[in-house]
Amino acid sequence: MPVQPPPVTTEQNETEAVRADNYQPSDLGPNPAGRAKLLIGAALLVLITAGAVTFLNRHTESNALAKETEAVSVPTVAVVQPASEPGNDELVLPGNLLAFEESPIFARTNGYLLRWYKDIGSKIQKGELLAAIDTPEIDQELSQARASREQIKAALDLAKISADRWANLLKTDSVSQQEADQEASGYQQALANLAAADANVRRLEELESFKNVYAPFSGVLTKRNVDPGALINSGAQATGKELFDVARVDPLRVYVSVPQAYAPSMKVGMKANVTLQEFPSQKFLGTVARTADAIDPATRTLNTEVDVPNKDGKLLPGSFGQVHFATGASVPRITIPVNAMLFRAEGPQVAVVDKDNKVHLRPISIGRDFGATLEILGGLDVSDRIVINPSDSLEEGQQVHVAKPSAGDAHS
């Protein structure tokens, strides 16, 4: 028998019809337009992310380069602290020997040098003739002034006679009071003219007396700057020329810069010995004559004068020596390495680094030279940090990096 298919119910047909009516294309997946938008958005997101990462990397590198450049521009220096060494009862300081009195000699009148009588190194006495100057113009002016005075004196005699005559005539009413007063006034004017003429003559006589140049005090002639025939101008201005230089060399003044720590020990009248390298076995006894009674704020030292007799003239002004004081007090001395020095136009200096790592150039006063170290008399404290092997380019207030000094630079 033939097989017949199962019968299809009406319910199944309706269900299939509903499924066919509810079919949507989205159920089969996105369309091509939507897929393109997703790809473009993903690509933009990748580009934006890559750009942001690149920008951040460049910004970070730029900041790192700026910091590195700034770090390189700030120099690195090695510092040490001054050493404090035990002192002794004797204080030895450098001193400058200067003449007790020294004066340049200028001419007080114009003319030509006739001759000089003393040359350099000559021992001279106060009031001794040093040079003679020919003053033809002053001589002629003096002659003219004297002649004018004689004319004025003659006019005065005539004015006196006229005044007396008119005074007598006034008694008899032969002349008026006005006329008599005029003659009397003329006589007074003549007196004034004569006084002016006398003053002018005295002035020229004084100028003419300056044609002879005399020594103002006893001493040694240290300079002679003119020769016979030279034109001489008066005064010490630009047109004037120094003729001689005279120095009093007995005694000599020795100026010493005493550190502040020893200042209380400096008393007027205390003894001190002066030694010079050219006289190694001799000591020249001196006396503290005076002090400045004030500490120099730049060097923290007391300017002290020691007077040393020099009757035989062995000591020469301008020399350098060592002054030995018996202070009776042992004050520690400060020393620094020689490679910490800066030599500039302002004088010896050191570079001190403060707590903010900034450089300050500080002037110092140098005492004895011990070879590898120098004694510092003023300008430093043991707590200061000083730069060793400082560069000439270091400036006041410059920022630096501080590094530990090497073993070779350490100051023991």
Image: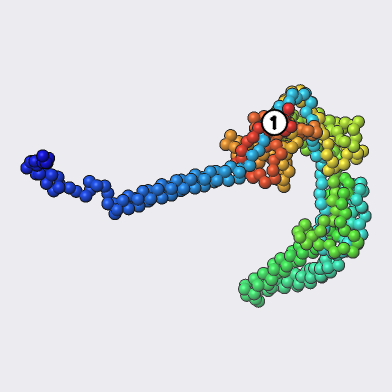
* Residue found at x 11% / y 41%: 2
The quarter of the displayed image where residue 297 is located: top right
**Which quarter of the image is occupied by the C terminus?**
top right
The colour scheme is rainbow
> Is residue 168 visible in the rendered structure shown here?
no
Residue 135, given in percent of the width and then of the height, sits at 85, 65
The secondary element bearing badge 1 is classed as loop
Residue farthest bottom in this picture: 174
Near-viewer residue (255 or 137): 255
Instruction: Name the residue carrying label 1.
Output: 82
Residue at image position (73%, 67%) is 193
Number of numbered tags placed on the structure image: 1
Image position, residue 362 (x, y; %): 66, 39
Q: Is 245 situated left or right of 299 in this image?
A: right
Say few, some or many: other residues with alpha carbon within 10 Å of mark 1 (under 14 / 14 to 19 / 20 or more): many
Question: Label 1 sits on what residue type?
Answer: Pro
If the image is split into quadrants, where does the N terminus sit? top left
Q: Position of residue 84 (x, y in %)?
A: 71, 27
Residue for point 76% across, 72% down: 155
Q: Quadrant of residue 172?
A: bottom right
Image: 32 above or below 174: above
Q: Nearer the viewer, residue 85 or 16?
A: 16
The residue lying toward the viewer, choosing from 178 and 43, is 43
Residue 369's place in the image compared with 136, above or below, is above
Determine if residue 3 is in view.
Answer: yes
Q: Position of residue 102 (x, y in %)?
A: 82, 46
**Residue in the image at 86% along x and 67% along y:** 136
Outermost residue toward the front? 1
